[in-house]
């Protein structure tokens, strides 16, 4: 069993026991003992009032992942504590989040509050840097802007529990802009250049060109673009493992199911064949889309 399993299961007691038995964790173990066994919380290099807020989140993580308090009770304790600290006893969750955000922004930070995978946890960072990329796609070169988020103080619960080893890599803003957390990405990697940039840039082109396009059609086209440009044989396998015809509401599963059918006769161990097949399918699908939605000027 790997230590990451304990973190994914939110089992910090199990993680600490595992660390005590494995020599390679002896350097990090005292930090876990301090926080979770002794309740000695971290202090961040931010104003004291903001540290008081983050301390309530740290208590919530200790309650939930170490002390075994049910999440609902721990969440209730957290929200009650935040309302008392901010002196807004009657605020609902949205008002509370707004108030918290305003406090951090007043000190020059960006802040996002809410839940990630079922648990509360803020994202607090210094700088948002909009970065324009020119992205080569099968039919054209597109310009695509990504926000690179830098100078993180706090990156929600998984980052906290793992001292930065695991955590959210980014998210989409309500307007569709992709936000990438700088420390979570290698900006020269295919994960960024192909699976994120080319995938998302293809979405923006397709939504403009075919306004009626369905989510499954969008995902299918973007996955073909990834397969055409990727040098990773594992990518096709990843898509095939997601294929599920029965999940009609899951655009990724539906797109992958179509890819599974259409790559059935392709040698899945030969990269150039996969890349060529992906391009051929992409062009055929563009014709299909033009017939269905009309050819845009």
Image: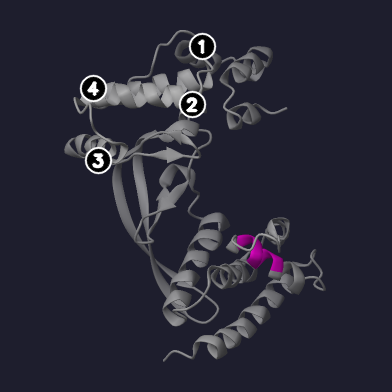
* Residue that appears at 22% across and 26% down: 89
Is residue 75 in sight in this rendering? Answer: yes
Q: Earlier in the sequence, mark 1 or mark 3?
A: 1
Q: Classify residue 93 by image quadrant.
A: top left
Q: Nearer the viewer, residue 292 or 242?
A: 292
- Residue tagged by mark 3? 98
Residue depth check, mark 1 versus mark 4: number of the one nearer the observer = 4
Q: How far apart, in angstroms, are the residues tagged by discs 1 and 3?
A: 34 Å
- Residue tagged by mark 1? 33
Q: Earlier in the sequence, mark 2 or mark 3?
A: 2
The colour scheme used here is one colour
Q: How far apart, in angstroms, are the residues tagged by discs 1 and 2?
A: 22 Å
- Whether residues under marks 1 and 3 lie with C-beta atoms below 8 angstroms apart, the answer is no
Q: Residues within 10 Å of mark 4 (few under 14, many from 20)?
A: some
Q: Earlier in the sequence, mark 3 or mark 4?
A: 4
* Residue that appears at 46% across and 18% down: 63
Q: Secondary structure at mark 3?
A: helix
Measuring from the top left, give residue 249's x and y in whole percent: 59, 61
Query: In the drawing, what numbered circle is on residue 71?
Result: 2
Q: Which residues are magenta?
A: 252-257
Q: Secondary structure at mark 4?
A: helix
């Amino acid at each position: 069993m790997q230590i990451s399993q304990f973190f994914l299961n939110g089992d910090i007691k199990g993680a600490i026991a595992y660390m005590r038995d494995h020599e390679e964790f002896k350097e990090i173990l005292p930090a876990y003992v301090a926080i979770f066994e002794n309740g000695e919380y971290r202090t961040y290099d931010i104003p004291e009032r903001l540290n008081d807020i983050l301390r309530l989140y740290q208590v919530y993580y200790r309650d939930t992942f170490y002390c075994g308090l049910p999440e609902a009770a721990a969440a209730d304790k957290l929200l009650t504590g935040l309302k008392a600290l901010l002196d807004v006893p009657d605020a609902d969750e949205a008002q509370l989040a707004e108030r918290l955000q305003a406090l951090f922004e007043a000190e020059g930070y960006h802040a996002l509050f809410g839940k990630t995978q079922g648990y509360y946890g803020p994202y607090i960072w210094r700088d948002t840097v909009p970065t324009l990329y020119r992205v080569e796609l099968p039919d054209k070169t597109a310009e695509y802007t990504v926000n690179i988020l830098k100078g993180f103080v706090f990156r929600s619960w998984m980052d906290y529990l793992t001292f930065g080893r695991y955590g959210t890599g980014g998210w989409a803003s309500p307007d569709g802009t992709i936000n990438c957390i700088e420390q979570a990405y290698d900006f020269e990697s295919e994960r960024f250049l192909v699976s994120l940039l080319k995938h998302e840039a293809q979405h923006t082109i397709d939504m403009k060109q075919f306004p009626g396009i369905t989510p499954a059609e969008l995902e299918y086209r973007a996955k073909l673009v990834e397969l055409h440009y990727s040098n990773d044989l594992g990518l096709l396998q990843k898509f095939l493992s997601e294929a599920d015809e029965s999940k009609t509401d899951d655009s990724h599963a539906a797109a992958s199911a179509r890819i599974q059918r259409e790559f059935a006769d392709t040698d899945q161990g030969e990269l150039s064949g996969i890349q060529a097949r992906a391009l051929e399918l992409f062009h055929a699908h563009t014709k299909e889309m033009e017939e269905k939605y009309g050819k845009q000027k």
